[in-house]
Structures are given as C-alpha cells and as structure tokens.
Amino acid sequence: MRVRLLALLGAGLLLVLGAAPASAVEGGQGLSYLALGDSVPFGFNPLVNAADASNFVGYPEIVAKRLSLEDVNATCPGEATGGFLSLTGTDNVCRPYRAAFPLHVSYSGTQMDFALNYLATHKHTRLVTLTLGANDYFRFLKDCAVGPTFGTCALGFTGMLATMQANLSTIFSRIRAAGYDGVLIGVTYYALNYVTGAAGTLALDAPMVAAVTGAGGLVASGFDAWQATAFSSGGGDSCLAGLLIALPSGGCDVHPTPLGRDLLAQKVIDTIAGSCGFQSARRCLKID
C-alpha cells in the first residue's frame, strides 16, 4: 500500500520538522501561522518514509522558524480544491494518503473545517497561506485518460480552471467570513521547465491569483521564486538547477529540494515585507 501510494504521489502531485507544537494546536495563545494546501507546503518527498510526518519539511516550517511563529501545517498531499471543501469532493490522492499515513496535524473532517475551527479558537494567528490547485489538474488528466466524458474531463480544461477558481474563492471567502482579517497569501506554483512549461504553469496559477486578490490577500509567486535560479543554474530546467528532488532512476520528482523549498519560503517572507512598504516581515505581521 505504501509503495503504491508513494508511486501515485510521485507521478501525480505538483506539485515538518515535526507536528505543530502542542500549544499551537490545543489552544495556546502564541502567535501562530496556519499553512493550508497540498504536497508542496506539506514538504512531500517520495524518497523518505511516509509513516513519520516529521520526515517532511515544507516551506511553512522555514517561514515559521524565520518569523518566530508557531507553525500549524494542516496540508495534505494530493489535496484538490473540491476535496478541501468536502469529503466527497474531487480528490487526487489526499483521502487515501490520510487513510494510510499521518499528516502534520490530525483531523477527521475537511481541511476547510480544520482551518475554520482553528481560526475561531486562535485569535492570535498572524499568517495564513494556501497552495492548492495542481491536483485539480492532475485529477483532470487521470479522468481524461479514461475518456473525454469521464469525471472532471467532461468540464474541459477551461471548465476545470473555472471550477478551481470558484472553489478557491469559496475557501478564501470562508476564511474571511470566519473573522480572520490578517495576512492571507496564495502561494502559486513554480514551473518544472521555464522554457517549455511557463505558459501552462501561469495558466494553472491564474485561478489562485484571481481568488486570493479578490479576498484582499497577497500573491507569493512560486513561479517568480524559482525563475532566476532555474535559468542561471539549469538553462530554465528546474530539475537541472537542483530545485526538484532527483530520483535514483534518473530525472526528477515534481517536489522541491531544500533549495527550492527555501526559495518559496523567502518569497512568502518578501511578499509580506513588500505589502507594508518593505519593512521587515516581522513588523508587518506585528510580531515585533
């Protein structure tokens, strides 16, 4: 089961130092950071043991450490926007992953429910980030491999993107409706190859950009975070640039290396700082 799921994740996802501190999860009043989304912020790596969630370190852990925030990482590998909102919504492999392996924090309902419950009881939350949407596309590809009228394939590519945007808008609006008026960031995806895949990545990122800005949030561009390094070190290829996890069989997985992860973390921090006149991100978040 483990091997099968890891193979699915390696092929299907674009895409912590331990579980969140107990005080953050159980009602502590420390300043906290809630990370939401899929395998990228989860820190998924197909080469390590999934039975221990502490083996996975995503960009939220780096952001939290640099900003001295309590880290609550509620992400799930394989999460799609429909599954984020409903346990019967469109999913890639989040639900089977949750059934087999631990997440960074444990919850029985949806990621949306966890987020709303957490925000309702942790009024000192300073930052919420979301990376989500790639698994809608991967589910679309899987469905289209069955047939043009099967599952999400019937929507067509533009219909799939429209559904993604509607779901993301619902997620952000529910976070705001819950009373959270702090810094809210949509972290978009990087390109696997900036020469051949830039247009497709930007199309995939567009629903997130529209949804988070519509909710008065910020965009931390994963595309921009990697672009310079991809060209300077790999001729535009993120694998050759050392931004993607190298596989023993050759080539790369779609998930970030520590270098790629840290560039995403820095983009989040820079986005926060840039939102208030390029003061320090800590000051922007009212930590200092």
Image (cartoon, rainbow, N blue to C red):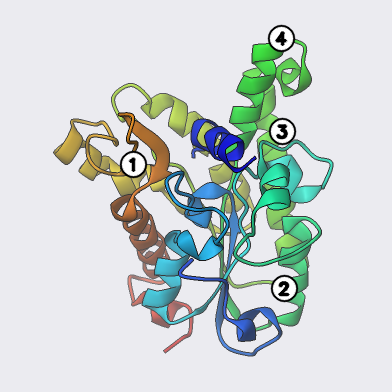
- Residues tagged 1 and 2 counted as in contact (Cβ below 8 A): no
Look at the numbered disc 1 and give the secondary structure of its residue: strand
- The residue wearing badge 1 is 244
Q: Is residue 211 left or right of residue 249?
A: right
Cα separation, mark 1 vs mark 3, equals: 28 Å
Lower position in the chain sequence, tag 1 or tag 4:
4
Lower position in the chain sequence, tag 3 or tag 2:
2
Lower position in the chain sequence, tag 1 or tag 3:
3
Q: Amino acid at mark 4?
A: Pro
- Residues tagged 3 and 2 counted as in contact (Cβ below 8 A): no
Pick whichever, 222 or 257, lies toward us: 257
- The residue wearing badge 2 is 118
In the image, residue 141 sits, relative to residue 88, either above or below, namely above
Image quadrant assignment for residue 201: top left
Give coordinates of residue 197: x percent, y percent: 38, 25
- The residue wearing badge 4 is 148
Look at the numbered disc 3 and give the secondary structure of its residue: helix
Cα separation, mark 1 vs mark 4, equals: 31 Å
- Residues tagged 3 and 4 counted as in contact (Cβ below 8 A): no
Give coordinates of residue 158: x percent, y percent: 64, 22
Q: Amino acid at mark 2?
A: Tyr
Cα separation, mark 2 vs mark 4, equals: 40 Å
- Residues tagged 1 and 4 counted as in contact (Cβ below 8 A): no
**Looking at the rendered structure, which numbered label has been put on residue 163?**
3
Cα separation, mark 1 vs mark 2, equals: 32 Å
Is the residue marked by circle 2 packed among few (<14), some (14-19), or many (20+) residues within 10 Å? some
